């Protein structure tokens, strides 16, 4: 029996206080993957105990890796070495996690065993050709559905993969990471050139585990002549999760919050840059480094936002944060225009279409375009019912909209919030959002 979750947000209020949001999802995934392939025992703190990252953890357990935890964000991984994975006894089920599926497809293409990657209905509809096609150029054998979607049937090509020099047609950290992981098992050098900067957690963490990675401008290269050595990882708070409260405190009059130990990797801070361009008051305090990643405390106080044309070079640096940035745009004075974000149409939902429909349902003038949206801000956000289409970031974004709404907002199909940010409801309520969570069994 499936559990259905509906969020109901009462209008108005303000956010006050301080919070530490859970660990970065991208880094949590990669800590399990690289820790499993390392020699020795890796200790992880700040691991995100949400369903997506747990799907990755379970997949490596299914391939013979002993992993203790998670308990209080701590995980202990007994690495099996680069060539120590074993064939899983059954299909690897990855739930809703596109990161798990895309990165694992590269990692498993060069193993000495076959496996099948499956996921839930949402993941099974998401495009996988963006990774399977370049992997095929390396000699990988991966069978998809006719539409290029999961399940992925991977025939291991141990010792057979060939390095390639791949120029990505679209900026995507998942594609880059997938090919770099495959390159650890390929003959010769594998290089990936990106058209715009994307998050670089894979390269940073590979280096943290002692694996040689070359960077030359927009080009990243790797080869099979390296090994991973166990290390200690302290996962920073996820800026994608912090983004909901960055926007909430910016738009709700009288708000003032501090978010602790947030990752401010320069490939991820587009949301801060965009909000600052709109007039947000965000201070970066106590900057330091944790496990090779820059972290800081963020202090946000409410301010009058203005509409902007979002610079296209910032789009890949904020790709996951646009649902809540659209809420900021709805509250800003004047027009906000987003272009160059066609990737939003192939996320957990078509985030451009779904956000536009939800904003219109609340009385906001929002016009979707093929690669973005035009939002007329400054008007009133009304109440109403919004369909999240099972997309966790859509559900959380419209929860934040309640801070400026004139009537209650009901958000349907919110169960997938647990895939990325299980603590969202509790932190939001503790900071002052009037959120009610209703559960029913279907």
Image (tube, grey):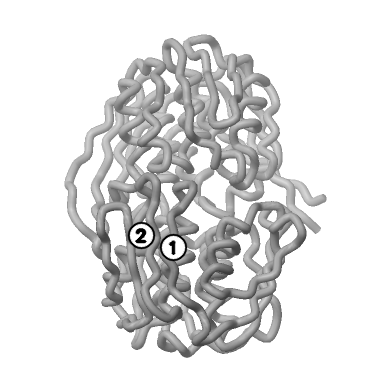
Spatial CA span between label 2 and label 1: 9 Å
Q: Which of 73 and 88 is in front in this view?
A: 88
- Circle 1: element type: helix
- Circle 2: element type: helix
Mark 2 or mark 1, which has the lower sequence index? 1
Is 192 placed left or right of 339 in the picture? left
Q: Which of 317 and 300 is in front in this view?
A: 317
The residue at the point 50 percent across, 26 percent down is 327
Residue 170, position as x, y percentages in the image: 48, 47
In front: mark 2 or mark 1? 1
The residue at the point 66 percent across, 56 percent down is 123
Residue 359, position as x, y percentages in the image: 61, 23
Q: Name the residue under label 2.
A: 201
> CB atoms at circles 2 and 1 under 8 Å apart?
yes
Q: Name the residue under label 1.
A: 177
Residue 77, position as x, y percentages in the image: 42, 80
**Res 32 → quadrant:** bottom left
> From this viewpoint, is residue 72 visible?
no
The residue at the point 63 percent across, 66 percent down is 94
Badge 1 crowding class, 10 Å Cα cut-off, few under 14, some 14 to 19, many 20 or more, is many
**Res 231 → quadrant:** bottom left
Q: In this view, does 11 lie above or below 191?
A: above
Q: Which of 141 and 61 is in front in this view?
A: 141
């Amino acid at each position: 029996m499936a559990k259905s979750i509906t969020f109901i947000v009462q209008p108005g209020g303000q956010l006050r206080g301080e919070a530490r949001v859970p660990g970065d999802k991208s880094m949590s995934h990669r800590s399990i993957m690289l820790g499993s392939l390392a020699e020795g025992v890796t200790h992880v703190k700040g691991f995100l105990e949400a369903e997506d990252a747990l799907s990755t953890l379970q997949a490596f357990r299914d391939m013979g890796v002993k992993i203790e935890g998670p308990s209080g964000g701590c995980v202990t991984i007994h690495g099996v070495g680069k060539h120590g994975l074993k064939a899983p006894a059954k299909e690897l089920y990855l739930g809703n996690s596109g990161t798990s599926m895309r990165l694992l497809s590269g990692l498993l293409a060069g193993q000495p065993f076959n496996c099948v990657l499956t996921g839930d209905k949402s993941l099974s509809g998401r495009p996988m050709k963006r990774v399977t096609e370049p992997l095929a150029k390396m000699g990988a054998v991966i069978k998809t559905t006719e539409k290029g979607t999961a399940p992925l049937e991977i025939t291991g090509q141990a010792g057979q993969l060939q390095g390639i020099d791949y120029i990505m047609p679209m900026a995507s950290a998942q594609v880059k990471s997938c090919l770099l992981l495959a390159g650890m098992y390929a003959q010769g050098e594998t290089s990936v050139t990106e058209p715009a900067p994307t998050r670089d957690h894979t390269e940073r963490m590979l280096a943290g585990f002692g694996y040689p990675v070359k960077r030359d401008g927009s080009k990243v290269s790797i080869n099979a002549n390296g090994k991973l050595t166990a290390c200690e990882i302290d996962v920073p708070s996820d800026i994608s999760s912090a983004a909901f409260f960055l926007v909430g405190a910016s738009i709700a009059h009288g708000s003032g919050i501090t978010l602790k130990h947030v990752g401010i990797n320069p490939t991820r801070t587009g949301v801060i840059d965009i909000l600052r361009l709109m007039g947000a008051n965000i201070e970066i305090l106590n900057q330091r480094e944790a496990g090779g990643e820059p972290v800081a405390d963020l202090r946000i106080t409410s301010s009058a936002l203005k509409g902007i044309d979002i610079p296209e070079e910032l789009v890949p640096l904020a790709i996951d944060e646009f649902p809540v940035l659209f809420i900021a745009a709805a509250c800003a004075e004047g027009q906000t225009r987003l272009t160059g974000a066609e990737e939003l149409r192939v996320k957990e939902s078509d985030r451009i279409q779904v956000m536009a429909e939800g904003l219109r349902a609340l009385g906001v003038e929002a016009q979707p375009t093929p690669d973005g949206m035009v939002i007329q801000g400054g008007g009133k956000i009304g109440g109403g019912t919004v369909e999240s289409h099972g997309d966790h970031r859509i559900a959380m974004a419209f929860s934040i909209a309640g801070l400026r709404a004139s009537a209650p907002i009901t958000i349907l199909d919110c169960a997938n919030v647990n895939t990325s940010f299980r603590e969202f409801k509790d932190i939001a309520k503790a900071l002052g959002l009037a959120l009610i969570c209703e559960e029913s069994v279907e």
